[in-house]
């Protein structure tokens, strides 16, 4: 109950302070809308926002799946080969220094105006966390277990499957949780590239041009709730696929 009640109470306090600041501080609603204006926009524009949310959520989910597959495969390749680590890992790090607002329009010109360039943007900004998380998980394998597998004359594939992969799962989920947050940002920036005609990112830019700040903040609220929901789903998946790691975290938290 504390995990639910305390965040809700804090949220109510922040929303109340926000409402008082706007109402008593005399802030122009065109500059910063109040919470009740945002709530009104969520209801009045619910059809438009829901349609845009479906577009963005599809891009985020597919982009994270692509990032998870590519990031996990790349992390395993880096883990198994020192040559691959020396050649590829610096490029993986450098890929995160490319500004998304600059990269997104170029991808649109190269890949067209469909969903593909948006998926690429989401995957690029998400896969780094999965690569690093997976590598950290693979690095935490107990050396004694590896020694035991060598003593049993186990093959490299069998050792990876029964020892290294289970050890890497918590790191994979940790990277995926981080990727959830940045993937939403990547999807929004990709939808604001030239040629975009849908999604919550496109609606944010449209709301700014139409002087509808309440709708823009309402979209931010939707994105935040979606990110929290995805984070929660990944936490549930971690409890199911890697229960041993979750139990260790629970013991530490107590």
Image (spheres, grey):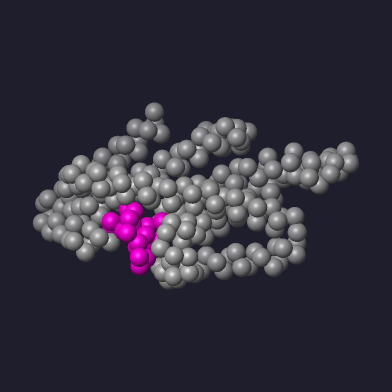
- Is 217 drawn above or below residue 169 in the view shown? below
Q: Nearer the viewer, residue 15 or 187?
A: 187
Question: Is 148 left or right of 134, judged from the image as shown?
Answer: right
In the rendered image, residue 202, in percent from the top left (x then y), is placed at 31, 58
Question: Is 36 left or right of 136, judged from the image as shown?
Answer: left
Question: Is 154 left or right of 202, judged from the image as shown?
Answer: right
Question: For residue 211, which quarter of the picture?
Answer: bottom left
- Is 179 drawn above or below residue 241 in the view shown? below
In this orientation, does residue 7 appear?
yes
Question: For residue 12, which quarter of the picture?
Answer: top left
In the rendered image, residue 207, in percent from the top left (x then y), is placed at 23, 58
Is residue 197 magenta-colored?
Answer: yes
Is residue 161 magenta-colored?
Answer: no
Q: Residue at x 56, y 44 (%)?
A: 173
In the rendered image, residue 11, in percent from the top left (x then y), is placed at 29, 41
Q: Which residues are magenta?
A: 187-204
Q: Nearer the viewer, residue 73 or 85?
A: 73
Question: For residue 183, which quarter of the picture?
Answer: bottom left
Tell me the quadrant of the picture where the N terminus can be found. Answer: top left
In the rendered image, residue 75, in percent from the top left (x then y), is placed at 65, 54
Q: Residue at x 74, y 38 (%)?
A: 162
Q: Nearer the viewer, residue 182 or 192?
A: 192
Question: Is 17 left or right of 194, judged from the image as shown?
Answer: left
Q: Residue at x 75, y 64 (%)?
A: 83
């Amino acid at each position: 109950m504390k995990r639910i009640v305390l965040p809700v109470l804090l949220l109510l306090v922040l929303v109340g302070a926000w409402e008082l600041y706007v109402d008593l501080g005399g802030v122009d609603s065109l500059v910063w809308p109040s919470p009740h204006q945002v709530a009104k926009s969520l209801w009045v524009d619910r059809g438009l926002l829901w349609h845009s949310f479906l577009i963005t959520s599809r891009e985020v989910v597919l982009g994270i799946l692509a990032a998870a597959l590519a990031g996990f495969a790349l992390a395993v390749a880096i883990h198994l080969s020192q040559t691959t680590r020396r050649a590829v890992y610096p490029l993986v790090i450098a890929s995160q220094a490319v500004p998304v607002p600059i990269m997104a329009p170029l991808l649109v010109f190269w890949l067209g105006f469909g969903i593909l360039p948006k998926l690429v943007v989401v995957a690029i900004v998400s896969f780094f966390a999965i690569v690093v998380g997976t590598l950290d998980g693979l690095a935490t394998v107990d050396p004694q277990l590896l020694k035991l597998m060598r003593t049993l004359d186990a093959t490299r594939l069998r050792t990876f499957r029964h020892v290294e992969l289970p050890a890497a799962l918590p790191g994979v989920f940790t990277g995926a949780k981080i990727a959830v947050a940045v993937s939403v940002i990547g999807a929004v920036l990709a939808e604001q590239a030239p040629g975009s005609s849908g999604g919550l990112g496109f609606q944010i830019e449209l709301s700014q041009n139409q002087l509808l700040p309440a709708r823009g903040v309402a979209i931010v609220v939707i994105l935040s709730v979606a990110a929290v929901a995805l984070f929660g789903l990944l936490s549930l998946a971690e409890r199911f696929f890697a229960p041993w790691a979750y139990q260790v975290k629970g013991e530490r938290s107590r």
